[in-house]
C-alpha cells in the first residue's frame, strides 16, 4: 500500500520489552531517526506489575509526520536485552470516552455506601481523556459535544507521581438527570487532540493504565 498508515497521527509500537523504561524507549527512538522530531511517547504500565504492557503510543502533530516516521521505527531490535523481537508499527486512534456516575462501591470503613448515593449522585467520572488533561481541555470537549457548561464543575485530579497522566476527570452537575444526559451524550465519542493547543516534548511520562479499557483502542494493520 502506498500509504499503509493513512488517517491517523498516532502510531502504536509493539513488541517492546516489558522492563524498558520511558526514557530508554525515547532515547532508542531518537537514535533511530526521531531526534529533533516533535512527538509524544505514551508507555502504558500495568497497575499491579509496574512493568510496561509491551506496547507504546507515539503521537505526532500531523499524519504526514507519522507516516514519515513509520519506516524509521519499524524493525528496531532491542540489543542488550533478552528480547529477540523487533518493533512493529500499526495505527492507533483516540480511545472512546467512558463516563459513569462516580458512585463508590464501598466507604472508607469498608462498609457499603449509603443507598441514597445511587439516586443523589450527580458527579461523573470521565475516563480515557487525551493528554495533557486540564479543566480547559475537558470544558472544550464537553462544549464541542453539546454539554451545557453553566451547570457543571470540572475537577482534574493531580497525577501521582507528578508528570504522569491521570487520564480522567470529575464533572459535577446540579442534578443526576443532567449528569446522566451528559454521560449519554459523550459516551463512545473520542476526545480528539487539538494539535495547535499542545506543547510537544520528546519525553512524556505515560499513564499507568489504571481504570482504562485498552479494548477501546482501535488499530489497523
Image: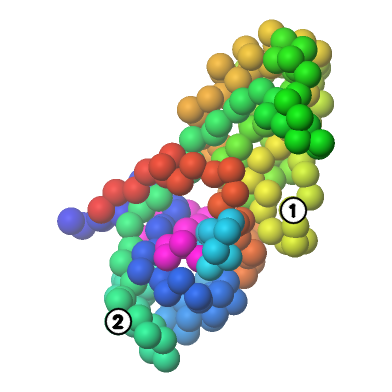
Element carrying mark 2: loop
Residue 163 seen from this side? yes
Residue 149, horizontal then vertical, whole percent: 76, 20
Magenta-drawn segment: 52-67
Q: Which residue is mark 1?
A: 159
Q: Is residue 219 above or below residue 144?
A: below
Front-most of residues 92 and 122: 122
Circle number at residue 136? none
Q: Nearer the viewer, residue 112 or 148?
A: 112
The residue located at (74%, 15%) in the rendering is 115
Q: Position of residue 23 (x, y in %)?
A: 59, 76
**Farthest residue, direction left:** 1
Asked whether 59 falls inside the magenta stretch, the response is yes
Q: Is residue 187 above or below residue 178?
A: below
For residue 103, side relative to residue 23 (left or right):
right
Image-based side of 117 in relation to 167, left or right: right
Q: Position of residue 167 (x, y in %)?
A: 64, 46
Residue 140 visible somewhere in the drawing:
no
Q: Position of residue 129 (x, y in %)?
A: 60, 41
Residue at x-position 79% and y-position 50%: 158
**Contact, mark 1 vs mark 2 (Cβ under 8 Å):** no
Q: Residue 84, which numbered label?
A: 2
Residue at 81% x, 13% y is: 174
Amino acid at each position: 500500500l502506498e500509504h499503509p498508515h493513512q488517517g491517523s497521527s498516532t502510531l502504536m509500537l509493539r513488541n517492546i520489552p516489558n522492563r524498558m523504561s520511558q526514557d530508554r524507549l525515547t532515547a532508542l527512538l531518537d537514535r533511530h531517526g526521531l531526534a529533533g522530531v516533535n512527538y509524544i511517547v505514551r508507555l502504558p504500565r500495568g497497575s499491579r506489575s509496574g512493568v510496561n504492557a509491551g506496547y507504546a503510543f507515539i503521537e505526532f502533530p500531523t499524519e504526514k509526520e507519522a507516516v514519515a516516521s513509520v519506516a524509521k521505527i519499524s524493525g528496531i531490535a532491542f540489543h542488550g536485552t533478552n528480547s529477540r523481537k523487533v518493533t512493529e508499527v500499526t495505527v492507533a486512534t483516540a480511545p472512546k470516552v467512558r463516563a459513569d456516575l462516580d458512585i463508590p462501591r464501598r466507604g472508607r470503613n469498608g462498609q457499603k455506601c449509603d443507598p441514597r448515593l445511587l439516586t443523589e449522585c450527580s458527579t461523573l467520572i470521565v475516563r480515557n481523556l487525551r493528554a495533557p488533561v486540564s479543566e480547559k481541555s475537558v470544558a472544550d470537549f464537553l462544549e464541542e459535544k453539546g454539554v451545557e457548561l453553566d451547570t457543571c464543575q470540572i475537577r482534574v485530579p493531580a497525577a501521582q507521581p507528578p508528570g504522569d497522566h491521570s487520564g480522567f476527570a470529575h464533572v459535577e452537575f446540579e442534578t443526576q438527570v443532567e449528569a446522566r444526559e451528559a454521560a449519554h451524550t459523550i459516551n463512545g465519542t473520542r476526545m480528539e487532540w487539538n494539535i495547535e493547543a499542545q506543547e510537544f516534548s520528546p519525553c512524556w511520562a505515560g499513564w499507568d493504565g489504571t481504570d482504562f479499557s485498552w479494548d477501546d483502542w482501535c488499530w489497523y494493520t
